[in-house]
C-alpha cells in the first residue's frame, strides 16, 4: 500500500469512527442534527472508500477497512460508552481479525 493509500484508509476510518460515535449518540438522544451529521460522515467515508477500491481492489480495501473499524469501533464502544462483550462476541472479533489478516497477507489473485 502506498503512503497516499494509507492516508486515505486513515481518513475513511476516521470518518467511519466519527459516524459510528455520532450514530450511538443519536441512538441515546435522537435529533435531526445528529442524524444528518451521521449520514454525512458515513457518506464521506464511503466516498473515500471508492477511491481505495479503485486503487487497491475491492477485497483488499474493504477487508483492511473492516478490520481497522472493527478494532477501533469496539475500543470506542467499550471505553467511551461502557459497553461490554460476552466471551463469544470477543472470540468472534478475534476470529474476524485473524480471517482478515489471512486474506491480506496471502498472495493476491490478480
Image (spheres, rainbow, N blue to C red):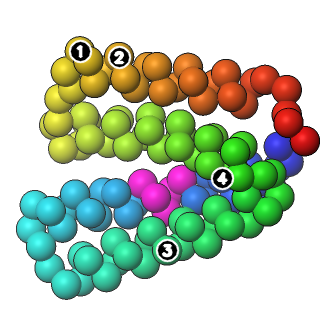
Residue count near mark 4 (Cα–Cα under 10 Å), binned few <14, some 14–19, many ≥20: many
Q: Magenta part of the protein: which range?
A: 13-17
What is the distance, in whole Å, between disc 4 and disc 1 at their CAs? 30 Å
Q: What residue did someone put label 2 on?
A: 91
Mark nearest the camera among 4 and 1 is 1
Which circle's residue, 3 or 2, is located before the other in the chain? 3
Q: Quadrant of the N terminus?
A: top right
What separation in Å lies between label 1 and label 3 (alpha carbons)? 33 Å
Q: CA distance from mark 3 to mark 4?
A: 15 Å
Residue assigned mark 4 = 9
Q: Is residue 7 visible?
A: no
> Which disc, if any, is residue 87?
1
Q: Identify the residue at horizontal 61%, vertical 72% (top origin).
A: 47
Element under label 2? helix
Between the C-alphas of marks 2 and 1, the distance is 6 Å
Q: Which-is-in-front pick, marks 3 and 4?
A: 3
- Asked whether 65 falls inside the magenta stretch, the response is no
Give the Cα distance between marks 2 and 4: 26 Å
Q: Check whether the beta carbons of the residues at disc 3 and disc 2 lie within 8 A of each other.
A: no
**Element type at marker 3?**
helix
Which of the 4 quarters of the picture holds residue 102? Answer: top right
Q: Can residue 29 be seen here?
A: yes
Is 27 placed left or right of 14 in the picture? left
Q: Earlier in the sequence, mark 2 or mark 4?
A: 4
Residue located at (19% from left, 84% from top): 32
Residue 36 vs 62, above or below: the answer is below
Q: Which residue is mark 3?
A: 43
Labels 4 and 1 touching (C-beta < 8 A): no
Q: Is residue 25 left or right of residue 3?
A: left
Amino acid at each position: 500500500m502506498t503512503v497516499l493509500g494509507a492516508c486515505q484508509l486513515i481518513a475513511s476510518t476516521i470518518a467511519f469512527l466519527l459516524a459510528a460515535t455520532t450514530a450511538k449518540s443519536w441512538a441515546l438522544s435522537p435529533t435531526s442534527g445528529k442524524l444528518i451529521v451521521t449520514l454525512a460522515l458515513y457518506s464521506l467515508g464511503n466516498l473515500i472508500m471508492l477511491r481505495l477500491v479503485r486503487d487497491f481492489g475491492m477485497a483488499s480495501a474493504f477487508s483492511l477497512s473492516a478490520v481497522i473499524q472493527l478494532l477501533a469501533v469496539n475500543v470506542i464502544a467499550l471505553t467511551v460508552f461502557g459497553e461490554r462483550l460476552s466471551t463469544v462476541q470477543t472470540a468472534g472479533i478475534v476470529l474476524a481479525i485473524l480471517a482478515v489478516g489471512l486474506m491480506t497477507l496471502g498472495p493476491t489473485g490478480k
